[in-house]
Structure formats: structure tokens, C-alpha cells
Image: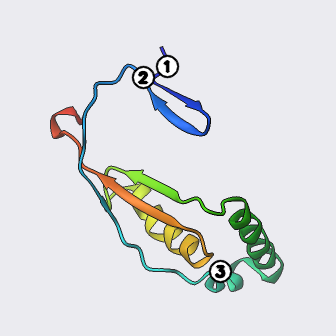
Amino acid sequence: MDRCLWQDEVLQLRDLPSQEYPVHEILVPRRALANLEPLIGAERYGDLIRIAGTTREKLEGRAVWNISSTAEGGGVAEMLQVLVGYTLDAGFDVHWLVMSGDPSSSP
């Protein structure tokens, strides 16, 4: 049976034990999108700025939440340190939460 289901843009969890886990927000400094222009070129940078603007309009009034199990030492954590910073500079309401779980449930 599926463990989750998307319905009306909300993730519904099914057949999972009810449990609460503490979370804390990781504050990531902004990274200037302009630093990417010399790497990707003026044309692609222009596309990036244009698409970011269009996406901001579509997400107006919404926040993007990244949730992970660690803030350091893993590939996801390393990517989020960079990507959240650029996304903040692009004007998005973006957050990163780290969830602490039961250590006995880890592989």
C-alpha cells in the first residue's frame, strides 16, 4: 500500500505511526545570483533571472520548505547550503528544516 498520497497539493501520510520529531531551522546566508553570470554566461544568466521572476509570481504567497535529517556531512546538506542561498537571493521565501529522529530507527 502507498505510504503517502498527494491530494489537493497536500502530502497525506497513511499507515504510519503517529510520532512527533523535533525540528530546527537552518539559517543559510544569501549567495549572490550575480556570481553565476561569469560561469554560465550572460544569456543563460538572463534566462535564469527571467525564469526566477516568473516562478516567484507563480509561488506568490507560498513558501518552499526543505526538510532533511542533517545539516552537515551529507550530499543533500552540502547542496542545500548552496541552493537555499541562491534561492533566497532570487527573492523566494525558502526555508530549511532539520528533523531529529529516533536514532534506533536509523540503518
User: Amino acid type of disc 3?
Assistant: Leu
1 and 3 marks in contact (CB < 8 Å): no
Q: Residues within 10 Å of mark 1 (few under 14, many from 20)?
A: few
Residue farthest right in this picture: 43
> Which disc, if any, is residue 2?
1
User: Amino acid type of disc 2?
Assistant: Arg
> Which disc, if any, is residue 14?
2
What residue is at 47 percent from the left and 62 percent from the top? 79
The picture places residue 58, in percent across and down from the top left corner, at: 72, 59
Horizontal placement of 34 versus 64: left or right? right
Q: Which sits in the foreground, 24 or 8?
A: 8
1 and 2 marks in contact (CB < 8 Å): yes
Horizontal placement of 101 versus 91: left or right? left
Which of disc 2 and disc 3 is earlier in sequence?
2
Q: How far is the residue under mark 3 from the one under mark 2?
A: 42 Å
Q: How far is the residue under mark 1 from the one under mark 2?
A: 8 Å
- Provide the secondary structure element on which disc 1 rests: loop
User: Amino acid type of disc 1?
Assistant: Asp
What residue is at 25 percent from the left and 40 percent from the top? 20
| Residue indicated by mark 3 | 36
